């Protein structure tokens, strides 16, 4: 493991340790909420959505990115498998009022 996190050009070295990142509930978010208040946050969100509906592409992109996060291929595959299992369970479920099948050993 490298002892330095940067090379002689100041770039991060491959395999170097990552930083801790921003902690959850960091001061930025809590200070922002205190500064403008919860009601104003809703007003800001409503304004962004209104601009998106009026055709503002940047606002629409912001809304879409937050509502529909990008799935990676593995997540999409798992989602399809879960849907297939859910459908199989629905198709093989006993009719209402009938006892469930006993497990086979």
Image (cartoon, rainbow, N blue to C red):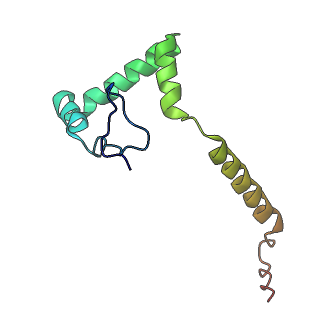
For the image, the number of numbered tags is: 0
Q: Residue furthest top?
A: 55
Horizontal side of residue 67 vs 33, given as left or right: right
Which residue: 55% across, 34% down?
68
Residue 88 vertical position relative to residue 98 in the rendered view, above or below: above
Which residue: 24% across, 41% down?
26
Residue 36 vertical position relative to residue 14 in the rendered view, above or below: above
Query: Looking at the picture, how far across and down is residue 52, in whole percent?
Result: 49, 16
Which residue: 22% across, 34% down?
28
Query: Looking at the picture, how far across and down is residue 103, in whole percent?
Result: 77, 85
Which residue: 47% across, 14% down?
58
Q: Residue furthest bottom?
A: 105
Residue 81 vertical position relative to residue 53 in the rendered view, above or below: below
Residue 91 vertical position relative to residue 8 in the rendered view, above or below: below
Query: Looking at the picture, how far across and down is residue 34, in whole percent?
Result: 17, 34
Horizontal side of residue 53 vs 43, given as left or right: right
Locate the C terminus by quadrant. bottom right
Horizontal side of residue 1 vs 76, given as left or right: left
Q: Nearer the viewer, residue 51 or 19?
A: 19
Q: Nearer the viewer, residue 104 or 44?
A: 104
Q: Residue furthest front?
A: 8
Query: Looking at the picture, how far across and down is residue 49, in whole percent?
Result: 45, 21
Horizontal side of residue 27 vs 20, given as left or right: left
């Amino acid at each position: 493991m490298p002892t330095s996190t940067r090379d002689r050009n100041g770039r991060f070295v491959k395999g170097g340790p990552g930083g801790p990142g921003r902690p959850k509930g960091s001061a930025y978010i809590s200070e922002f909420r205190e500064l403008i208040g919860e009601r104003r946050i809703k007003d800001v969100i409503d304004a962004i959505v209104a601009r998106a509906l009026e055709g503002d592409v940047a606002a629409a992109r912001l809304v879409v990115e937050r509502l529909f996060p990008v799935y990676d291929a593995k997540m999409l595959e798992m989602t399809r498998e879960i849907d297939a299992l859910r459908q199989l369970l629905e198709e093989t479920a006993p009719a209402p009022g009938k006892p469930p099948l006993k497990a086979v050993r």
